[in-house]
Amino acid sequence: MININSKVFIAGHNGMLGSSIYRILKKKGYKKIITVDKKKLDLRNQIAVKKFIKKNKPDAVIIAAAKVGGIKANIKYPANFISDNLQIQTNLISSSHINNVKKLILFGSSCIYPKHLKKPIKESQIMTGLLEETNESYAVAKIAGIKMIESFNKQYNTNYICLMPCNLFGPNDNYDSQNSHFLPALIKKIYLASKAKKKDKVVKLWGTGKPLREVLYVDEVANACEFFLRKKTKKSLINIGSNVEMSIKNYANLVKKKIDPLVLIKFDNDKNLDGVMRKKLNLTLAKSYGWKSKMNFSKVLDEIIRDFKNSHI
């Protein structure tokens, strides 16, 4: 089994999730963490990835590297989302198997599930209906990764799993106005509006504000990663989420209250930018293995707003 003396390769250690996993593993005493900058290793390059894994011989591989983005980015760059993600995960999974990696964890997102499902969503509901069109390319790539892991486990008895988190937020998030996820976008847009003169404190947001979203602080997922790194599981797909679920409008109002109550929020009411109306995950399986979120949402939201002000302004 994996322990603090095992060699653990974190692919994507500079991203929000990867950097969080790196911090948590360091905090828990892991001594042999392997990282590499994407400028030195293109994870889409099959030959380069095979050489890297063969040379470094990790005991575990964590795939936190991915092409990710918000709804507009998914609509605009579908080819990048499907091709980059397919190449990254395929190269890492196959190279890990060839080099006898003991444990592998692939991360995806709750958007892999069909859009018309009874909620909360169980892992068994994967591939039981049509996907949400706006992020279909990303979802198809991640579903291929899930099925690849299931197939390797079945054929080669490998100990590989997929963790599927809900909407993540935290330090080192992407605050790009066009490509970020909804919560960092809310923080940035509302903060910028708060700096305007009183009569101009207006922020225009995409969609209707009605869709419900479940959110989770990224360090919670990193802790889940470390937890399942050590655990043998019968199931290869496990949802990771929280008890926090609100409408986009309510998240916006909460962020406004914390940054500047005088900001006026207006939605453009473009339903095409709403995405799925609800994506709440069923967390029974993760809890049965002994993991559940301990997040204090209001507290960590304060921390992230403070982090944004210190790091991005």
Image (cartoon, rainbow, N blue to C red):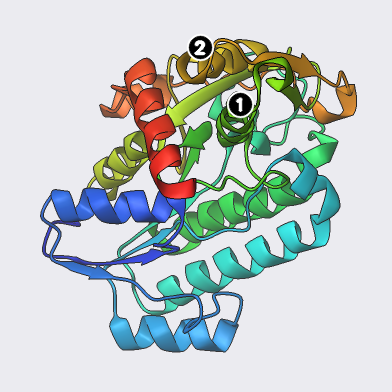
Q: Please name whichever residue, 292 or 310, is drawn nearer the observer in this view of the structure.
A: 310
Could one spot residue 12 in this view of the protein?
A: yes
Tag 1: amino acid: Ile
Instruction: State which quadrant residue 194 falls in.
Output: top right
Residue at image x 80%, y 16%? 208
Distance from the alpha carbon under mark 1 to that under mark 2: 10 Å
Residue at which label 2 appears:
257
Q: Which label's residue is closer to the chain start, 1 or 2?
A: 1
Q: Residue at x 56, y 64 (%)?
A: 89
Tags 1 and 2 touching, CB below 8 Å: no
Type of the residue with mark 2 = Lys
Q: Position of residue 41 (x, y in %)?
A: 49, 81
Q: Taking 295 as reference, is 21 above or below it?
A: below
User: On the picture, is 7 further left or further right than 201?
Assistant: left
| Quadrant of res 209 | top right
Percent of width and height locating residue 304: 40, 33
- Counting from the top left corner in percent of width and height, residue 114 is at 73, 30
Q: Position of residue 125 (x, y in %)?
A: 64, 27
Give SS at disc 1.
Answer: helix
| SS class, disc 2 | helix
Position of 194 relative to 145 (above/below): above
Compared across the picture, whether 205 is left or right of 148 comes to right
Q: Nearer the viewer, residue 165 or 270?
A: 270
What residue is pinned by disc 1? 190
Figure check: 122 above or below 235:
above
Which image quadrant: the N terminus? bottom left
> Which numbered tag is attached to residue 163?
none
Badge 2: how crowded within 10 Å, few (<14), some, or many (20+)?
Answer: few
Res 98 → quadrant: bottom left
Which residue is located at x 73 percent, y 21 percent? 200
Seen from the viewer's position, the closer of residues 136 and 179 is 179
Residue 160 seen in the current view: no
